[in-house]
Image: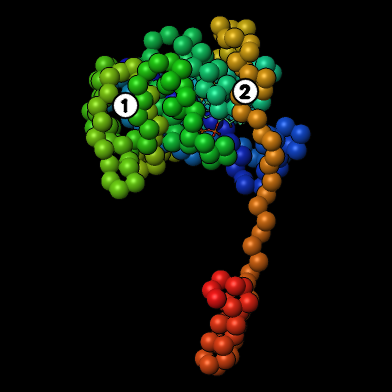
Amino acid sequence: MNIIVCIKQVPGSTEVKINPDTGTLMRDSVEAVVNPFDEYAIEEALQIKEKHGGVVKVITMGPPQAESALREAVAMGCDEAILVSDKAFAGSDTWATSYTLSKAIESLGETNLIICGKQAIDGDTAQVGPGVAEMLDIPFVAWVRKIEEISDTTMKVERLMEDGYEVVEMPLPGLITVVKDINQPRMASLKGKLRAKKAEIKVITASDLTVEESKIGLTGSPTQVLRSFVPEKKTGGEKIEGEVPDLVKKITDTILEMKIIK
Ligand SMILES: Cc1cc2nc3c(=O)[nH]c(=O)nc-3n(C[C@H](O)[C@H](O)[C@H](O)COP(=O)(O)OP(=O)(O)OC[C@H]3O[C@@H](n4cnc5c(N)ncnc54)[C@H](O)[C@@H]3O)c2cc1C
């Protein structure tokens, strides 16, 4: 079974500044980590491989430094690592990211299953997994919490819902996005870390893919960030102290002043 895991390198902190001109995140100044949800995707792929055999490839689209995220995935046990990186891809929104990733995945040959995290903790849109599936024209199930059965051509999964779960069967090739209930990601072993240090990272650039220039990077991104801002901090409120009759009067006076009720 050929499995591809899509991972994203994200800031390990919420203290990320936003470029006022482009509305994009300025990621250079903070430590970068593998998107936590993608660790569950990696673990699930490795468990499938351990039971059914096959190859697990890990892919990310990002700047050259995203290579370290791929090495972490190799240290956990992934067999091959692919970095999709080119200045032409810079500024991609979720649509252009999904388009570029789908083209890169196509270029890697036959794949039975693609696994993504449920969402990235920085962009937070949860659009890339479904976007890749749409662009590859393959079925997908989002928010998978358990794989009940899997073969090269079909799988049965439990999909988390707000009020329970659904059991869904889908043909493969297909794509799933996974939630954290699905497994407990392993720690990389020392042997894995040593292998990851030396692992060859395949780099895919725009000229390696049959992509339409009008669909990649900032110019190929239909989303436009018009304004980004930090929401105003709420004040701590007013603490009213005293005896109950005084408190009741103060509270009712305040409510009347606010004209919430007449
Ligand atoms: C106009 C615009 C410009 C932007 N410019 C930039 C920019 O210059 N630099 C930048 O870093 N971001 C940029 N972004 C943000 C970028 O579009 C998103 O970070 C990216 O598309 C992923 O979306 P998300 O973070 O919401 O991921 P989600 O959709 O929440 O991620 C879901 C899952 O998809 C997979 N996934 C997501 N992203 C990737 C990836 N890159 N590679 C492999 N798998 C992935 C992972 O499995 C992840 O768990 C821009 C966004 C907009 C709207």
Q: Does the residue labelled 2 lie within 8 Å of ligand 1?
A: yes
Q: Which of 68 and 90 is in front in this view?
A: 90
Q: What element carries label 1?
A: helix
Q: Name the residue type under label 1.
A: Ile
Q: In which quarter of the image is the N terminus?
A: top left
Q: Name the residue type under label 2.
A: Ser
Left or right: 20, with 161 as reference point: right
Left or right: 76, with 158 as reference point: right
Residue shown at 44% from the left, 34% from the top: 117
Quadrant observed for ligand 1 in the rendered image: top right
Which circle marks residue 48 in the picture? 1
Q: Position of residue 77 (x, y in %)?
A: 43, 27
Dot placed on the residue nearer the N-terminal end, 2 or 1: 1
Q: In which quarter of the image is the C terminus?
A: bottom right
Q: Taking the image as drawn, is residue 192 in sight? A: no
Which residue is denoted by mark 2 in the rendering? 221
Residue shown at 52% from the left, 36% from the top: 125
| Quadrant in which residue 201 is drawn | top right
Q: Position of residue 227 (x, y in %)?
A: 70, 39
Which circle marks residue 251 in the picture? none
Q: Which of 198 and 236 is in front in this view?
A: 236
Left or right: 241, with 192 as reference point: right
| Quadrant in which residue 182 is drawn | top left
Asked whether disc 2 touches disc 1, contact meaning CB atoms under 8 Å apart, the reply is no
Q: How far apart are the two marked residues, 2 and 1, measured between alpha carbons?
A: 35 Å
Q: Classify 10 Å Cα crowding around label 1: few (below 14), some (14-19), many (20 and above).
A: some
Q: What element carries label 2?
A: loop
Left or right: 259, with 136 as reference point: right
